[in-house]
Image: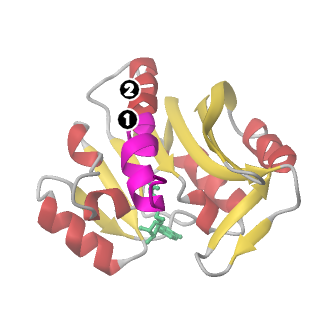
Amino acid sequence: MSLSGRAYYSKYIFPKYLKLIKRAMEMVEDKDCMKLKADCWNEAQKKEGIAHLLKNCICIDISSKYIRRASKRYPEVRAIKGSIDKMPFKDGEFGLLIDLSTIDHIADYEKVLDEYKRVLSKKGILLLVSWISLRKDKSNTRKTQYVFNFKKFNLEIENRFNIIKEGIVYERAKSVLYWFICKK
Ligand SMILES: C[S@@+](CC[C@H](N)C(=O)[O-])C[C@H]1O[C@@H](n2cnc3c(N)ncnc32)[C@H](O)[C@@H]1O
């Protein structure tokens, strides 16, 4: 019996995300540093919160609904309304930045990468997940989610960060959910 997208997420993708966060966290020198997680979607769900597992973690989301739900479920997490392409944070404020497929909701993702570079500290670590493919950038209007061209996406990351490790979270016929762990 095949699992629905949501059930598949819970069973396979979410546990992989937790492992990736652990790997990224191992590379962070100051474990007490401030951490930033893009979006509050996970925290708004029943079982898939992440920010509350990390000490000193702030979440930023464009959706008031998800912020409300996340704050209710995890009162200890600071959830802020804002867009990841223009964030209300100081330069170098975060030692770890986690984006689990939020960037692929923004066509102009270069701006997001610029912001991530700006708010990361000197030795900061970025865990970035996005849908990519070898084809041209493509939007799925139903889900307002993009699939970015791998070559260009990879190049834009390399222009700003050092990619330390990378790999596949999940593979579909025409696109791949891909992860990068980068240093500034
Ligand atoms: C499908 S969910 C993200 C996926 C989720 N992190 C996961 O584990 O699969 C998309 C989230 O990104 C948020 N979002 C979309 N555009 C955003 C933006 N410009 N800035 C911040 N959050 C945004 C949405 O409100 C929503 O919470």
Query: Which residue extends farthest front?
Result: 1
Q: Does the beta carbon of the residue at mark 2 sit less than 8 Å from ligand 1?
A: no
Residue 18 numbered mark, or none: 1
The image quadrant that residue 72 belongs to is bottom left
Horizontal arrangement in the rendering, residue 20 relative to residue 145 (left or right): left
Please name the predominant secondary structure of the magenta segment in the image. Answer: helix
* Front of the two marks 1 and 2: 1
Residue 153, visible in the rendered structure:
yes
- At 40% from the left and 67% from the top, the residue drawn is 61
Q: Is mark 1 within 8 Å of ligand 1?
A: no
Query: Does 109 appear above or below 158?
Result: below
Query: Label 1 is placed on what type of residue?
Result: Leu
* Magenta-tinted stretch: 1-17
Q: Does residue 88 appear left or right of residue 155 in this picture?
A: left
Please name the amino acid that badge 2 sits on: Lys
Which residue bears the numbered disc 2?
Answer: 22
Q: Residue at x 60, y 67 (%)?
A: 105
- Crowding at dot 2, Cα within 10 Å, few <14 / some 14-19 / many 20+, comes out as few
Work out whether 155 lies above or below 174.
above
Locate residue 88, reporting x and y percent. 42, 64
Which quarter of the picture shows residue 14? top left
Q: What residue do we see at 62% from left, 58% from top?
A: 112
Q: How many marks?
A: 2
